[in-house]
Amino acid sequence: MSTSVYKTKQKKLIYDFFKINKQKQFTCDEITYMLLNDGTPVGKTTVYRQLENLIIEGKIKKLNPHKGKSFMYQYIDESLDCENHMHLRCTRCGKYIHLGCDFMNQVSEHISKHHNFTVDNSKTEILGICENCTEKE
C-alpha cells in the first residue's frame, strides 16, 4: 500500500470519528487515544497532520485553548452554518454550543451600524457557565 493511500485512509478514519461525534470537542491526544483503543494504528504526529488538513478543507474547526489546555477540534456541521453564527463556551468544562438564533444576528447588525465594527461570527464566543456546570454548584 502506498504512503499516500495510507494517509488518506487515516484522514478518512479521523474525519469519520468527528462525524460520529458531531457535537463534541476533542484534543489531539484524546483523538489519538480513542482511535488506538478502537484498533486504528495511528500516531499523534499523524493525527496532528490530518487535523490540519481537515481544517484547511473546512471540515473541522480548531478551537482556542481553554484555561491552559490544548487546542480542541470539532466537526463543522454544514447544516449548522458555523461560519455565520456565534458560539457559547463554558469556562468550566469547555463545552462549545452553536448559537444560531436571530437575536444574535440583530446584535451583530447593531454593532456594525452603531459602532462601525464588523463582527466575525465564526470566531465569536460568548464565555459563561453551561447548564450542567451550573447544576453541579
Image (cartoon, rainbow, N blue to C red):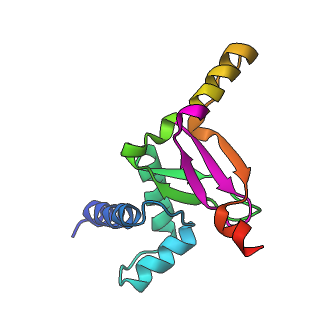
Q: Residue at x 64, y 39 (%)?
A: 124
Q: Residue at x 45, y 66 (%)?
A: 46
Answer whether residue 47 is visible to the viewer in this image: yes
* Residue 21 place in picture, x, y as percent: 42, 66
Q: Residue at x 47, y 60 (%)?
A: 23
Q: Note whether 128 is above or below 48 in the view shown.
A: above
Query: Magenta stretch: residue 131 in it?
Result: no
* Residue 48 place in picture, x, y as percent: 51, 62
Q: Within the image, what quadrant is residue 126 found in?
A: top right
Q: Within the image, what quadrant is residue 40 found in?
A: bottom left
Count up the numbered dots: 0
The magenta stretch is: 85-103
- Which image quadrant: the N terminus? bottom left
Query: Magenta stretch: residue 88 in it?
Result: yes
Q: Within the image, what quadrant is residue 58 found in?
A: top left
Pick the residue in front: 35 or 20.
Answer: 20
Answer whether residue 64 is visible to the viewer in this image: no
Q: Residue at x 43, y 82 (%)?
A: 36
* Residue 13 place in picture, x, y as percent: 33, 67
